[in-house]
Image: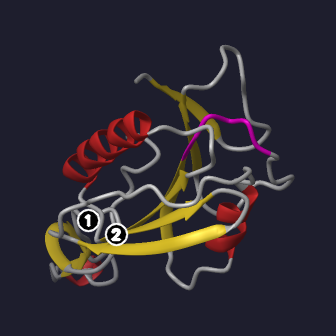
Amino acid sequence: RSMLADPARNDYSYRRYSKRFLYSGTYLPSLYSEDMGVLGVGIDTSGSMTARQLAQIQAELRTIIEDCAPSKVIVVYCDAAINRVDVFNKGEDLLLEMCGGGGTDMGEIVRYFDGCEEKLAGVIIFTDLETPFPEQEPPYPLLWGAVGARSGRTAPIGRVVEVRV
């Protein structure tokens, strides 16, 4: 939650006044919103992931969406290559589907979001961490949701959070 709590700047609000006019005693709204912006999500769909794990990932994502209210969620399904990309706008029901089933390279998801035109509030990649990792830290906050990972397994970049199934 701390990673994703930075609000988007897409609407005017009197919750924070524009500092440009305060010197003259004029109180005008500033750009502010309760939305967090665009959330990128990567789903490991390699052969080692199960339907039960996907159901747990979906439940976790729905909680994140309720708590953080992203304006859009971009879901990238990947095994050794990108298999599919779904976009869910605010208010749409999130439904994940397993596709793929080959090897594993979660670096493909990081490279996909590196080239994304959207300004990302953050990216969460749900995986068992049995993957080659990218070498450089991306320009957005990166969180690894470790689903069914071996105990003590970590990632060289981003932050790892255990997701229990």
Q: Which residue is mark 2?
A: 8
Q: Residue furthest top?
A: 151
94 or 157, which lies in front? Answer: 94
Distance from Cα at disc 1 to Cα at disc 2: 5 Å
**Contact check, label 1 and label 2, Cβ < 8 Å:** yes
Residue at (26, 71) in percent of width and height: 32
Residue at (58, 60) in percent of width and height: 100
Up-down: is 33 above or below 116? above
Q: Which residue is mark 1?
A: 35
Q: How are the colours assigned in the image?
A: secondary structure
Tag 1 secondary structure: loop
Image side of residue 40 versus residue 138, left or right: left
Where's the N terminus, which quadrant? top left
Magenta segment includes 89 = no
13 or 68, which lies in front? Answer: 68
| Residue 104 percent location from the top left of the image | 72, 50
The magenta stretch is: 126-131
Image side of residue 10 versus residue 45, left or right: left
Magenta segment includes 127 = yes
| Residue 86 percent location from the top left of the image | 40, 73
| Residue 113 percent location from the top left of the image | 62, 70
Crowding at label 2, few (<14), some or many (≥20) Cα neighbours within 10 Å? some
Residue at (80, 47) in percent of width and height: 133
Query: Residue type at mark 2?
Result: Ala
| Residue 161 percent location from the top left of the image | 53, 30
Up-down: is 113 above or below 41? below
